[in-house]
Amino acid sequence: NPAYEPWVVGDAPESKEGFEAAVAYGVAAEMGFSDENVVWVRTGFDEAIQPGAKNFDFNLQQFSITEERKANVTFSDPYYSTNQALVGFADSPVATATKVSELKDLKFGAQAGTTSLDFITKVIQPTTEPFVYDDNAAAKAAMEAKQIDAIVLDLPTALYVSAVEIEGSKVIGQFPLSDQVGADDFGMVLDLNNPLVECVNEALSRMRDLTYELVSIEETWLSGYTGAPVISLD
């Protein structure tokens, strides 16, 4: 699957540019591997979290850590936490919405199996069943074609999509955490019960608490993707 900014720049993770690309190389370095030892393979989002053997050591695609997925794969500790945000058209009546109750009549879309879809169904609870897509690219295409009114994405992705990918769109707002859907914690995916996760977690711990490299990477690649108005949950 293509990789998008701000997670990977130019669909080229080997460039080390983009938040997840930089995190992957940082973890590899902490584990004693040079950049030349890092090999990238392409996998679909759903494919990567299905049961069975993997063709990768670990995978980064903004995978939310959930109990359901833990039955099929092993997750690392979180390398990033975010919340959900709403992207709609700037000229739509909902563009000035400030609370969830004003969103009930929208037609929503989201990628299958994501925290964004959970947020739509459990928190927004629209009157129309949300449209579910294989990936974010399909959801964005549906919105551009005016088949749906809005999409829900993690905040950094939402800000990039509205600024670069969907003309005339805006981030209407970000949602606070709720009892039904908490923070969106991203973890690296490994084979189920893969002991390598201990080494990955140790590397992440050092990057977070000793070298502060995670903070530096976040400031480099995500500092422009965290600001948006807040939509209240009433």
Image: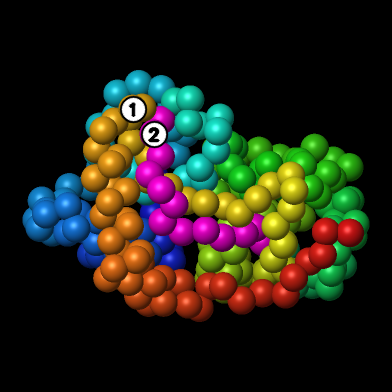
Q: Which mark, by number, is residue 74?
A: 2
Which label is found at residue 193?
Answer: 1
Q: Is residue 22 left or right of residue 165?
A: left
> Do the CB atoms of the residues marked 2 and 1 lie less than 8 Å apart?
yes
Among numbered discs 2 and 1, the one appearing first in the sequence: 2
The quarter of the rendered structure image containing the C terminus is bottom right
Q: Residues within 10 Å of mark 2 (few under 14, many from 20)?
A: many
Magenta residues, as a range? 73-85
| Residue 149 visible in the displayed image | yes
Residue 132 found in image quarter: top right
Q: Does residue 217 lie above or below 107 as drawn?
A: below
Q: Is 62 displayed left or right of 26 in the figure?
A: right
* Relative side of 215 to 30, left or right: right
- 156 on left or right of 104: left
Magenta segment main secondary structure: strand
Q: Identify residue type, mark 2.
A: Thr
Q: Position of residue 219 (x, y in %)?
A: 41, 77
Q: Nearer the viewer, residue 11 or 84?
A: 84
